[in-house]
Amino acid sequence: MLGVTFTVHAQNADIQVTVNDIEAAGEGPLVFMLFASSDGFPSDPAKARQIGEVTSYTSLATFTFSNVPAGKYAVAVFQDKNGNGSVDTNFIGIPKEPVGAFQHSSVGRPNFGKCSFTHDTAISQLNVQLINQ
C-alpha cells in the first residue's frame, strides 16, 4: 500500500448574536459569551470559549463570534451596568443585572442542554432576549 496522507480541514464560520428590546440602552457594556460546555454557563466569562463586548448600542445590539469551529455551543449575554466584569446577583443567586441566553425563557436558570445549538459551516444567527430589565 502506498503511503498516502489525507488532510481534512474543518470549516469555521461566524456566530452572530442580536439582542433586541434593550430597555436600559447604553447603561454599561453588553457582554457576549460563547460556551462549548456547561462548565461556567451561563455566567462565568472566564470559562467561555469566546467573549466579546459591545459598548455603544441603542435598544438593539449585535456581536459576532468569528471563525468558530463546528460544534455544540450555548450563548449567554449580560448587561454589565456597573462595569465590574461579572453578573451581579442577590443573596440567593438571582441576577440583579439584565441577562439572557439563546433559547431561554424567563423561568428558571438557563442550562446548557436547553440553550445549546449545533453550529456548522454556515453562519449561525441567534436572537437573545434580556430578562431582569
Image (cartoon, rainbow, N blue to C red):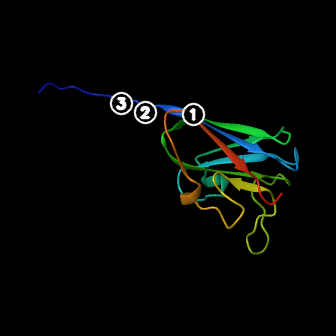
Per the model, the C-alpha gap separating discs 3 and 2 is: 6 Å
Nearer mark to the viewer, of 1 and 3? 1
**Quadrant the N terminus occupies:** top left
Which residue is labeled 2 in the image?
Answer: 10
Query: Horizontal placement of 34 versus 21: left or right?
Result: left
Q: Is residue 39 visible?
A: no
Q: Which residue is mark 3?
A: 8
Q: Position of residue 62 (x, y in %)?
A: 73, 38
> CA gap, disc 1 to disc 3?
20 Å
Residue at the location (88% across, 44% down)?
Answer: 26
Instruction: Find numbered disc 2 in the image and state the secondary structure of the residue it sits on.
Output: loop
Read off the residue under disc 1.
123
Observer-side mark, 1 or 2, equals 1
Residue at 86% x, 40% y: name it. 58
Residue, far left: 1
User: Are circles 1 and 2 on residues that touch, CB within 8 Å?
Assistant: no
Residue 124 on image: x %, y %: 58, 38
Query: Hey, what amino acid is under mark 3?
Result: Val
At a point 25% along the width and 27% down the height, the residue shown is 5
Q: Amino acid at mark 1?
A: Ile
Hey, what amino acid is under mark 2?
A: Ala
One can see residue 83 in this view: yes
Q: Residues within 10 Å of mark 3 (few under 14, many from 20)?
A: few
Which image quadrant: the C terminus?
bottom right
**Disc nearer the start of the sequence (1/2):** 2
